[in-house]
Amino acid sequence: MSNFNANDSKVRCGIYLCQVNEEISCGACCGLYNVVNPSYESIMEMLTWRTDTFSHVKREMDAILAFKEEVEDREPQERPFPDFHHCPYIGLVGKEHSRVGCLLHPLFDENKSIDFRGLSFYGGMACRVYFCPTYNNLPAVFKEIVRETASNWYAYGLVITEAKLLNTIFEEVAKRLNRPLTANSLLKNNGCLETVRELLDLKINWPFRRKTSSGPANYFFEDQLYSRPSINYEAIGGSVSRHDILLQELESQFNSANELHAAEDLIDGLINKVIGQVDRLKTEG
Ligand code: SF4
């Protein structure tokens, strides 16, 4: 898969999100994170095994279906979202196997241009035409910022489907900057880029995620089969937070008002750091 940017012109809203470059891609709609252990290490082990094993599989229907059985025997089949299909054909793609992708895709070298996606659960057509709600629900400038700042495919795929979270973060940054956000203003400074990355990585590292959460996986389909509970501020004697949407999207739970304030300070600290870095750049420029 080369010439990634050429795909921008082929998708709705002009920014291609699924395969960004050699290292950044997403497999969230294939259920990548809908696994018992969604840590980077565990998912990497799973994908590496699949990719290595699949490299010895004959490209014939029976062998490809037998591979699926082998994967499903080997891996726990309990899911945080039981009605969200997890595709056993997600693996590592690219010359160096440096990003997540589909082992049945025609551009996967060993498939010699043959599209085997018809053998998957959703079938080839669904895989070809599906685009997640982020394509419609996130402005192009925010998409660009996320594509450019993601630390790796794991972090990127977790956050890119979080349209509400991303809109809330970037709108808050723009509000405090008192002008519209441009990708350039955040990305042309390494310090700022690092801080935006830190802000987006809250999705992975959030210390206030409620104990009963199914982890960082996101059910983002529009049928809203699974939704995120609202935060019970009354239980800690507090009022609704100024960051209520962010806190809910991060699946937070607080045991005390102090914990809530610590969470708000953490978010404010990172947003203000971004503002400071953008403003400094403007002054120096
Ligand atoms: S979840 Fe969205 S960005 Fe990710 S692969 Fe699916 S359609 Fe592409």
Image (cartoon, rainbow, N blue to C red):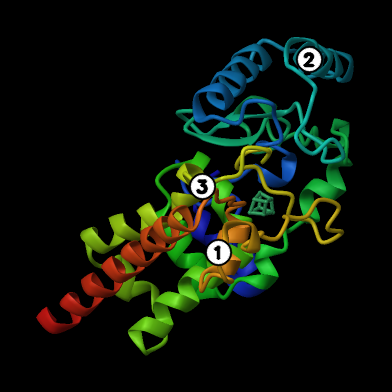
Whichever of callouts 3 and 2 sits on the residue coming sooner in the sequence is 2
Q: Please, what secondary structure does the residue beneath circle 2 have?
A: helix
Residue drawn at the location 79% of the way across and 56% of the way down: 221
Q: Which amino acid does label 2 sit on?
A: Phe
In the picture of the structure, the residue carrying the numbered disc 3 is 208
Q: Which quarter of the rendered picture does the N terminus lie within?
A: top right
The image shows residue 281, relative to residue 111, as above or below, that is: below
Residues packed near mark 1 inside 10 Å, few (<14), some (14 to 19) or many (20 plus): some
Residue ranking furthest to the left: 284
Q: Which amino acid does label 1 sit on?
A: Leu
Q: Please, what secondary structure does the residue beneath circle 3 have?
A: loop
Residues packed near mark 2 inside 10 Å, few (<14), some (14 to 19) or many (20 plus): many
Distance between the alpha carbons at the discs numbered 1 and 3: 12 Å
Distance between the alpha carbons at the discs numbered 3 and 2: 39 Å
Q: Residue 8, how many percent across, how many down?
A: 57, 65
Mark 3 C-beta to ligand 1 under 8 Å: no
In the picture of the structure, the residue carrying the numbered disc 2 is 67
Q: Residue 237, how many percent across, how many down?
A: 57, 63
Check whether the beta carbons of the residues at disc 1 and disc 2 lie within 8 A of each other: no
Residue 246's disc is: 1
Residue drawn at the location 83% of the way across and 18% of the way down: 60
Q: Which quarter of the rendered picture does the C terminus lie within?
A: bottom left
* Image side of residue 79 versus residue 185, left or right: right
Judge depth for marks 3 and 2 and give the one in front: 3
Whichever of callouts 1 and 3 sits on the residue coming sooner in the sequence is 3
Residue drawn at the location 86% of the way across and 18% of the way down: 65
Q: Please, what secondary structure does the residue beneath circle 1 have?
A: helix
Judge depth for marks 1 and 3 and give the one in front: 3
Residue ranking furthest to the bottom: 178
Q: Residue 45, how many percent across, how many down?
A: 55, 18
